[in-house]
Every structure is written in C-alpha cells, then in structure tokens.
C-alpha cells in the first residue's frame, strides 16, 4: 500500500515517499555505492569498462545498474552496441541537500525557505 503523507507547510503539498524509498534502497548497497563512486571519478563509462573497474560479472553489474537507473541516480546512453553510464549529479545532490531534511523537521524548526 502506497501512502502519501501531507507535509506541514504553507502550501500543504503532498510528499510521495515511494520515489524516496527506491532511491534509498538503491543507495543501501556497497556495490552500487562503489559503482556511483567510479562514475563520479570517471564520468561517462562504458559498461564493458565498468565490469573490470568494479570486478563484477556483467550479469550482476547489469542488475545493479538497473536499480540505479530505476531510482534515477544514473543515466544511460547507448552508442552502437555499448551502453555508457553517468551519475545523475542533480538527483544525488538533491538527496544530500537540506530539501529532504526539511521533510522530517517540525514546521517551527525549519529554516526560512525550507521545503518551498
């Protein structure tokens, strides 16, 4: 059952926790964090190179990449027969920003401009 809970703010917007759940599940794995780290360091990387970088069979790597893709934490671009992956810096920065923290603060404890 997917529940949407109201956020206490001036606009009374609704937060859908389903997308956050997928993102944090994707982040809750050491191999996926390693993949994200390598993409941060190297930029756009071919899946063929990622296999060697993270020392993982392509089938397992594809599983982890799909989870990261579905969570919106990485991008994929296909060039010919190869897929290239890149970190979605905007989404990662948004998750690490005060925007998410504001959702879990009492209205009176939120800094000015939070969750607007």
Image (spheres, grey):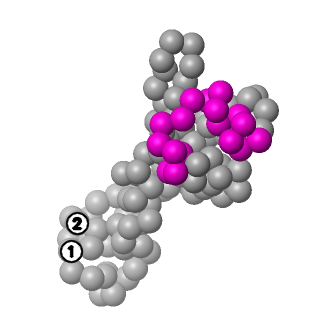
Q: Is residue 1 left or right of residue 99?
A: right
The residue at which mark 2 appears reads as 116
Q: What is the count of numbered marks? A: 2
Secondary structure of residue under mark 1: loop
Residue 80 appears in the picture as rendered: yes
Q: Label 2 vs label 1: CA separation?
A: 6 Å
Residue in the picture at 21% in, 74% down: 113
Q: Main secondary structure of the magenta part?
A: helix
Label disc, if present, on residue 50 of the rendered structure:
none
User: Which quadrant: the C terminus?
Assistant: bottom left
Residue 15 colored in magenta in the image: no
Residue found at the far top of this picture: 80
Residue 48 colored in magenta in the image: yes
Secondary structure of residue under mark 2: loop
Residue numbers of the magenta segment: 39-55
Residue 22 versus residue 82 in the image, above or below:
below
Q: Are marks 2 and 1 in contact (CB under 8 Å)?
A: yes
Q: Please name whichever residue, 65 or 116, is drawn nearer the observer in this view of the structure.
A: 65
Find residue 62 and report its horizontal and vertical position in percent.
68, 31
Q: Please name whichever residue, 77 or 116, is drawn nearer the observer in this view of the structure.
A: 77
The residue at which mark 1 appears reads as 113
Residue in the picture at 69% in, 55% down: 29
Residue 5 appears in the picture as rendered: no
Find residue 97 and report its horizontal and vertical position in percent.
38, 67
Q: Is residue 60 left or right of residue 37?
A: right
Find residue 59 and report its horizontal and vertical position in percent.
76, 28
Q: Please name whichever residue, 98 or 93, is drawn nearer the observer in this view of the structure.
A: 93
Find residue 46 and report its horizontal and vertical position in percent.
57, 29
Residue in the picture at 27% in, 73% down: 114
Within 10 Å of disc 2 (Cα), the crowding (few <14, some 14-19, many 20+) is few
Residue 93 in which image quadrant: bottom left
Residue in the picture at 44% in, 60% down: 95
């Amino acid at each position: 059952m997917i529940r949407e809970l109201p956020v206490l703010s001036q606009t009374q917007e609704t937060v859908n926790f389903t997308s956050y759940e997928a993102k944090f599940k994707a982040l809750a794995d050491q191999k996926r964090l390693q993949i994200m780290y390598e993409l941060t360091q190297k930029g756009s990387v071919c899946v063929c190179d990622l296999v060697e970088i993270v020392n993982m069979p392509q089938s397992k790597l594809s599983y982890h990449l799909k989870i990261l893709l579905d969570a919106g934490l990485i991008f994929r671009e296909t060039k010919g027969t190869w897929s290239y992956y890149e970190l979605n810096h905007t989404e990662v920065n948004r998750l690490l920003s005060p925007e998410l923290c504001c959702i879990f603060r009492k209205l009176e404890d939120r800094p000015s401009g939070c969750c607007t």
